[in-house]
Image (cartoon, coloured by chain):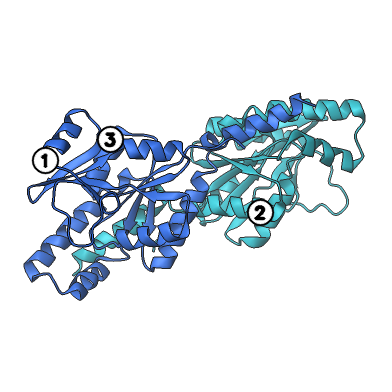
Chain colours: A cyan, B blue
Amino acid sequence: MRSERGMLIVLSGPSGSGKGTLVKSLLSRRDDTVLSVSVTTRAPRPGEEEGVHYFFRTREEVEAMIAEDSLLEYAQYNGNYYGTPEQPIRRWLEEGKNVLLEIEVQGAEKVMDHRSDLVSLFITIPSMKELERRLRDRGTETEEAMAGRLRVARQELSRAFRYDYVVLNDEVEKAVDRIQTIIDAEKMRYSRMENLILEVMEDAETD
Amino acid sequence: MRSERGMLIVLSGPSGSGKGTLVKSLLSRRDDTVLSVSVTTRAPRPGEEEGVHYFFRTREEVEAMIAEDSLLEYAQYNGNYYGTPEQPIRRWLEEGKNVLLEIEVQGAEKVMDHRSDLVSLFITIPSMKELERRLRDRGTETEEAMAGRLRVARQELSRAFRYDYVVLNDEVEKAVDRIQTIIDAEKMRYSRMENLILEVMEDAETD
């Protein structure tokens, strides 16, 4: 069978939906799948490695990337740029790797606006009460910050219609199974199986 | 969770691709899935039951169904009508059952032309040589009939682009696993998960 291009997979959902944990577990299960690394202008924190956690770049470098349209999406938080470089993604896809973009809801929409060759997954919490419980367990939020978080989460849930799939994250391992199911099914899409069909047909002509 | 409508699943592929065996195995594994029963004007064979193998009807009855547009598709073979009644399918879907249409490539295209609310699977053999071997093993075909079968199979393979998914039938159990994966993934499509999202959001408003 001819080698197939990888799949670009956008994984998003409200803060607190557990995207990061799902991604880690998924990557440990699949060696055909890699996580896209973001570029940032913020300083590395202890233990963060160039090219693993982030590509650390200067403001000028990131602005040059924006100018030459080499970021799939970017945003500024707390005065720093964060963005998704397109070039490594393109290389991985050509090598047949699936590339995960773990990304906030706003950034995800920007990517979906610009590319149609992707599979998009919205991770949802089982209930707002459960989200509240998770945020409370972190113990880092004031009541006001919490109310704000919940309001934003509800707004983000209302954007789920932009995604191909909705994955319920009630239990991590179950949710990762669901993501695996979606990736496995998407690999059987006609567009990704066309080479197989051509090979089956060609095989007859050499009889 | 509110009850969801079932999914209409078209399963097609060349004669010899093993559709019938896959369907039997799939039905034994999933009690949320039923097989659509065709209507026919041919006489019942020994052991065939009304409503299980076919709905046996007169020519006049089937022609009335055609006239009132109550068949999803129909065709004539050897002077008999064969068709797919729409009404039982609608009822099953409303009850939340997935409905399988196991159907020849031409009939499948007629259904796909008329309905967009379905998931379509094309079953492929691993190679034309394997198809030839399977047909030879049956031992019922003349060389000429065999050549005709292979020619038709190749034409049918060239129609695979009409389908959402391609399922390789190299081994029955593996192929049924693949079909299960597709059904499970399709259940996570946004359109089928919208109720869950609404419930998660509503849950917050009652806080």
Q: Which residue is mark 2?
A: A174
> Cβ–Cβ below 8 Å for labels 2 and 1?
no
Q: Is residue A191 above or below residue B178?
A: above
Q: Quadrant of the C terminus of chain B?
A: top right
**Quarter of the image holding residue A24?**
bottom right
Same chain for mark 1 and mark 3? The answer is yes
- Res. A3 in view: no
**Residue A8 position in % (x across, y down):** 55, 46
- The local crowd at label 2, few if under 14, some if 14 to 19, many if 20 or more residues have their Cα within 10 Å, is some
**Residue B25 position in % (x across, y down):** 40, 62
Q: Which residue is mark 3?
A: B113
**Residue A140 position in % (x across, y down):** 92, 38
Q: Quadrant of the N terminus of chain B?
A: top right
The mark closer to the camera, 1 or 3, is: 1
Q: CA distance from mark 1 to mark 3?
A: 25 Å
**Quarter of the image holding residue B140?**
bottom left
- The amino acid type found where label 1 is placed reads Arg
Q: CA distance from mark 2 to mark 3?
A: 37 Å
The secondary element bearing badge 1 is classed as helix
**Residue A44 position in % (x across, y down):** 84, 46
Depth check, front residue: B113 or B202: B202
- The local crowd at label 3, few if under 14, some if 14 to 19, many if 20 or more residues have their Cα within 10 Å, is few
Residue B75 in the figure: left or right of residue A18? left
At x 60%, y 50%, the residue is A179
At x 15%, y 61%, the residue is B149
Q: Which residue is mark 1?
A: B59
The secondary element bearing badge 2 is classed as helix
- The amino acid type found where label 3 is placed reads Asp
